[in-house]
Image (spheres, helix red, strand yellow):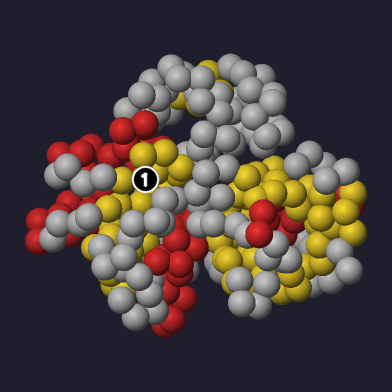
Amino acid sequence: MNKIINNYNILEIKEIISETETIKTFIFDWEMKKDKIPFPGQFVMVWNFLNKTDEKPMSISIIDIENEKIGITIKNVGKFTSNIHKLSVGDKLGIRGPYGNGFNTLEIENKDILAIGGGVGMAPIACFADYANEKANIDVVCASVTKNELLFSNKLKNNKNNMNIFTCTDDGTCGFEGYATHRVIELLKNKNYDLAVVCGPELMMKGVFDLLEAKNIPAQYSMERYMKCAMGICGQCCVDNTGWRICIEGPVFSNKDLEKIGEFAKYHRNASGEKEFY
């Protein structure tokens, strides 16, 4: 039985999948209660209580309702994530959530959807693609710097039906040579879409945003900001000019809402609230 400490579920790691040299997916048992069933695009807060370190938000990459499991996919980019990567099956983490507004999946039946993920931004995109595959026709752009960092491209190719996977790498080592924006330009030459979902580096999302707006394609974008509470209390993840909290009003925003966020693709704020420009 899972323990609960200070609103955290203390969960045992059931499986660890090494996706790339720097990215791992961690699988946990998850009781799919009505108010705790996660949706694609939502996130959880992760606490490595063994190392007494701060908690961090992590996108949910796998939602397996039938087997009551979830997965989070983590890139090793610093002290916190490095300590997580050192854990083994059987070790435990504190997990609370799920939080935030995910992708809107209410009206996707028989729609043509373009899903675009850059780097570890493929985590929520793959989760959405898994959910939407039986309901819609999906083209997935899976982008990374190089072949060895492509995330979930093989998994999506091997497991899905109404889905086409388009890989692209900056260095041309797999698929299209170029950025995600370049691959989107090529796809839009020959096909229109009813909807797009996007997650990745913010400058990449801005490039995709401009392309989709030019084609009048409605889209949903998953944003990332520094979070402390994930419950809308601390205000750390508020964005200019709206004051919206990424943890509550986001992390997924429609293209119409994204237009109102003045800092989008210009700057974000660090832990001290100072602006850091892209």
The quarter holding residue 202 reads: top left
Residue at the limit of the structure toward the left, as seen here? 190
Look at the picture and state if 185 lies above or below 157.
above
Q: Which residue is mark 1?
A: 220
Q: Going by the image, does 208 lie left or right of 274? A: left
Q: Residue at x 79, y 72 (%)?
A: 89
Residue 276: percent from the left, percent from the top?
Answer: 51, 22
Look at the picture and state if 186 lies above or below 208.
below
Can residue 100 be seen from the camera position used here? yes
Neighbor class of circle 1 (other Cα within 10 Å; few <14, some 14-19, many 20+) is many
Quarter of the image where the N terminus is located: bottom right
| Amino acid type for the residue under numbered disc 1 | Gln
Q: Going by the image, does 195 lie left or right of 82? A: left
Q: Nearer the viewer, residue 187 or 67?
A: 67
Q: Residue at x 40, y 25 (%)?
A: 261
Q: Residue at x 69, y 49 (%)?
A: 97
Quarter of the image where the C terminus is located: top left
Residue 106: percent from the left, percent from the top?
Answer: 39, 56
Q: Going by the image, does 164 lie left or right of 200? A: left
The quarter holding residue 166 reads: bottom left
Q: Going by the image, does 41 lie left or right of 257? A: right
Callout 1: SS: strand
Can residue 18 be seen from the camera position used here? no
